[in-house]
Image (spheres, rainbow, N blue to C red):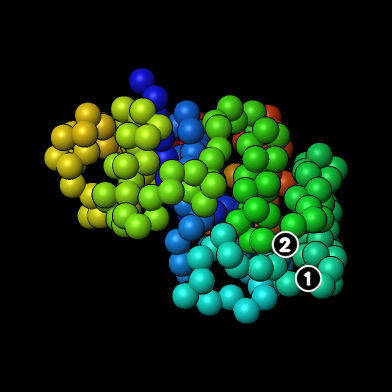
Amino acid sequence: MKSLAIMQPYFFPYIGYWQLINAVDRFVIYDDVNYIKGGWINRNRILINSTPTYITIPLNQSSPNKNICDTLLQSSLDWRRKSLKTIDNTYRKSPFFNEIFPIIENIINYDSTYLSDFIAHQLQVLAIFMGIKTEFVLTSRSYENSFLSGQERIIDICNRENASIYINAIGGRTLYESKAFSNSNINLKFIEMYSLPYKQKSKEFVPYLSIIDVLMEVGSIGIKEHLESFNIK
């Protein structure tokens, strides 16, 4: 039985996103849809001075009328240097800094012009590092079904991949009709994450931060428990 998940590309996404990747055989990066300003596509949060603070990929003329795969990164190298300096200053004293920072440095310095390519590389590098065996595919390079939308397109992608199980985030329950999936011999499932507290540089635990924060504090071995902390319904 082949399982599939489909999500927009996110910048250093939180642990729940990685749990979804870890739960399926193939993860489809949904990048030929409109860029959403103010979401998680080109930004995420790390814990600076005990405060959740955004780190952001600056974009060149981004627009909600432009697809993610057609959205360009700013060509200046300044944002890369500044991002790395911020992460360095924030996590230098973290227990797994020496293990994690070179991976982050490799990702941020990846020479790419397009946002979706940059994030796809990031997802693949971190997946390998965390021992996730899931395969990745970009919708902009496959399927040629962007004329479809919503549930219809999801089902079409599942059929093309011969997937018998489609897993979505728990918040997507209102978006899909299980009967439509079952009519196509697809078992619709939802993933529910369990947030495991870990020692942070704050008085109270702050959940849903970037994977950077988790990795810096628990390392490549400790992350295994967090990746498995979910339930499929």
Of 34 and 85, the residue lying toward us: 34
Secondary structure state at the residue bearing disc 1? loop
> Disc 2 vs disc 1: Cβ atoms closer than 8 Å?
yes
Q: Is residue 178 left or right of residue 21?
A: left
Residue at (64, 28) in percent of width and height: 131
Of 180 and 54, the residue lying toward us: 180
The picture places residue 17, in percent across and down from the top left corner, at 50, 47
From the image, tell me which residue sits under label 2.
113
Structural distance between the alpha carbons of marks 2 and 1:
7 Å
From the image, tell me which residue sits under label 1.
75
Dot 1 alpha-carbon crowd within 10 angstroms: few under 14, some 14 to 19, many 20 or more: few
Res 182 quadrant in image: top left
Name the residue type under label 2.
Thr
Location of the N terminus (image quadrant): top left
Does residue 191 appear in this view? no
Of 166 and 200, the residue lying toward us: 166
Residue at (18, 47) in percent of width and height: 177
Decide which of tag 2 and tag 1 comes sooner along the chain.
1
The picture places residue 137, in percent across and down from the top left corner, at 53, 40
Q: Would you place residue 108 above or below residue 163 in this image?
A: below
